[in-house]
Amino acid sequence: MILPLRQYHRRLVIALGIFLPAAFVLGIGLRRPIPSMDSLPDALIGAPQKFASAVWERADLFVKPPVQVRLLQRPASPGQFAMELSAPPDFIKPDLMVYWCPGDSKITDTIPTNSQLLGAFQSSFALTVPDDSLLGAGVIVLYSLADNEVVEVSKPFSISQP
């Protein structure tokens, strides 16, 4: 009774040994090509915002890391601002995000619920400042998504005053 089962098993393994590699090669050969585009459609490309005139530049907002903050203003409309953060090359943190927290809120290990995401930290890249941040003082929070921790919090400052 065991011999017929062994023979059946042997025939099945030999058939699978021939069929599976052939099916794999056939599947790889018949798959659809990866879609590609030369450029993004115009609807997906946002118009680059030009912030030319610098309102102020400060290097004393962050205590530990030497991060410089420049406040830029759009020349055409005086009410729109952007922040440009720059740091030396040795200041490397994974997935660093920049948040604006209004008021003098105490920030511990998590980001407050009233904070607003400005964008990813990239040296010499302008991050648009939300309109309601012009009303009062606030802080900049650098948060690492990879480490899930607050890296640094700036001193409280006001956008409208250097």
Image (cartoon, grey):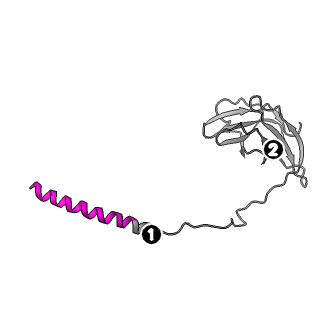
Q: Which residue occupies 73% across, 39% down?
A: 89
Q: Quadrant of residue 116?
A: top right
Query: Under tag 1, what secondary structure?
Result: helix
Query: Is 15 above or below relative to 109?
Result: below
Q: Residues within 10 Å of mark 2 (few under 14, many from 20)?
A: many
| Most foreground residue, 68 or 83 | 68
* Distance between mark 1 and mark 2 Cα atoms: 51 Å
Disc assigned to residue 1: none
Q: Check disc 1 and give the amino acid type.
A: Gly
* Residue 43 placement (x, y as % from top left): 72, 65
Of labels 1 and 2, earlier in sequence is 1
Which residue is disc 2 drawn over?
A: 83
Question: Local crowd at mark 1 within 10 Å, few (<14), some, or many (≥20)?
Answer: few
Task: Report whether 155 appears left or right of 109.
Answer: right
The x and y percentages for residue 69 are: 81, 39
Depth check: 114 or 65 in front? 65
Quarter of the image with the N terminus is bottom left
The stretch of residues the image draws in magenta is 1-24
Q: Would residue 5 be found to the left or right of residue 147 on screen?
A: left
